[in-house]
Image (cartoon, helix red, strand yellow):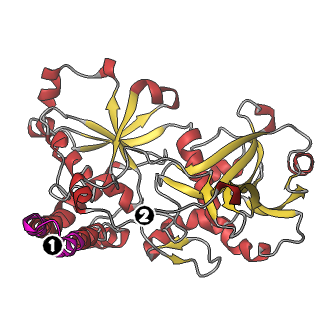
Amino acid sequence: MQPHDKKRCAVCPRPGKACSRCGRSYYCSKECQKFDWPLHRTLCASFENFQQRPDSQKRRAIYFPVDSDKPKFVWLPMSGHHPSLGAIRETFFSGEQFWPVSIDENPLQRTELRHDILLQCHMHFRESLGMNQSIYSLSGKTCSYFKGPAIAYCSSSGIRSKSTGRVVRDYGDSEADPSEFDDSDSEEDKAEGSDEEDIEYGDDSDTEEFLEWNDADPTDLRAIMDYILVIHGNERLLGALIQGDAIIDNSTSTKRFSGLEIPPTNHGALCTLGPDSTVARLFGMPLTLMLRSEKDKPHESAASAEGANSIIGLLMLNLETKHSESFGEIPERFRAKTIGTVAVIRQDGLPIFSSYLEAFCAWIKDDLRPSFADTHQQCLAELELKKACTKDDKKVIEHKENIKELQGKMLDTITRARFYAWCKDKGFELKHL
């Protein structure tokens, strides 16, 4: 899990510039801003009317009406240092009981949040209250789980220094997921020594626990909806099948890419989610492979008949910066001759159309891979020079920085702007950009 970065693009993991209107959401390009606009516009304009609290007993919150297609900012009543649950119940829930859903990370972007979000809502079994239209609409009509109204507000907690006010530990921090990029020192780096300084936290007698209730802003809506899409999306999945190489070689009528529909009741029964595509995540499109469950896996002979799947390898390029020698290459496991046909879905439950996925894979093959190959050779040359240096040679740091810069340039080419320009040049007319 990556730490929260205020200036991270709302769509992809790159630094961005603030929205000129609300000043809170950040975008690395106009393409990412355009992609996020259907969600962001619901709160962006009204944010300027909620800049100042009317009094110290109010906090800015996001309200999801049951009968409207978009949320809105409201002032949350406080009672002393805490939200007034009684006033919230009467004001927003017509006196009905509600339940909390705690959100402390963005599961799609795999980042910590700047604060915890508490989504107060009715449960899915309260059918008589009606489906929450604002959540249903913002989820692309993929989540009908929430019934009745809902409201989200925010808090921060942890330990801070009494004398300086500096936060020593934020309770929202989480341990790193081992499946994420490996940012730990390699054995080679450990031998060279680390450049990082140890942080001194001071005397325990100078620390205190704190809990603060914060104002919500437009960026919290993205975190809420990403959580809802991943955890509570309950409509059918629209994905794509990518046929194995042998099937395509032995058939003149089978298409390499085709649509796939999974009924909502069969999500868990038909598949388990496999590895996700790093290149797609950097692009801002959370794709993951859908692996067959054990009982549905074909025998080895049947899998061999489907052959390798050269397209899947393109989606699974190794972009882990610690793996200098294989950076930008297709991992061995995705070059296996028994991968066969593989399904691809979006982790957020939104549709991925076969025509769009076909164009995306063709772009990786014809545009990104050639430039990756050239840069990869430069990285290998720098790596050899680095290995030839002695432990104390100052050139070691120079070669490490050169490799990091080359890798960064490769990652910077994975953008929507470049993809759209390539599609236009190649004559791809995609309706779902």
Q: Is residue 203 magenta?
A: no
In the drawing, does residue 416 fall left or right of residue 213?
left
Q: Is residue 387 magenta?
A: yes
For the C terminus, the image quarter is: bottom left
Which residue occupies the foreground of this view, 265 or 15?
Answer: 15
Measuring from the top left, give residue 93's x and y in whole percent.
Answer: 86, 45
Q: CA distance from mark 2 to mark 1?
A: 34 Å
| Overall secondary structure of the magenta section | helix
Q: Is residue 50 above or below residue 243?
A: below
Q: Residue at x 28, y 55 (%)?
A: 320
Which residue occupies the foreground of this view, 277 or 69?
Answer: 277
In the drawing, does residue 43 fall left or right of residue 406?
right
Q: Which mark is residue 114?
A: none
Does the rendering let one see residue 402? yes
Residue 51 quadrant: bottom right
All told, the count of numbered labels is 2
- Seen as rendered, the residue at the extreme bottom is 20
Q: Which residue is mark 2?
A: 13
**Amino acid on which the number 1 mark rests in the picture:** Asp
Q: Which residues are magenta?
A: 382-403
Does the rendering let one see residue 69? no
Which residue occupies the foreground of this view, 377 or 119?
Answer: 377
Measuring from the top left, give residue 273's x and y in whole percent.
Answer: 39, 36
Q: Is label 2 or label 1 in front?
A: 1
Q: Residue at x 32, y 50 (%)?
A: 277
Q: Which mark is residue 393?
A: 1
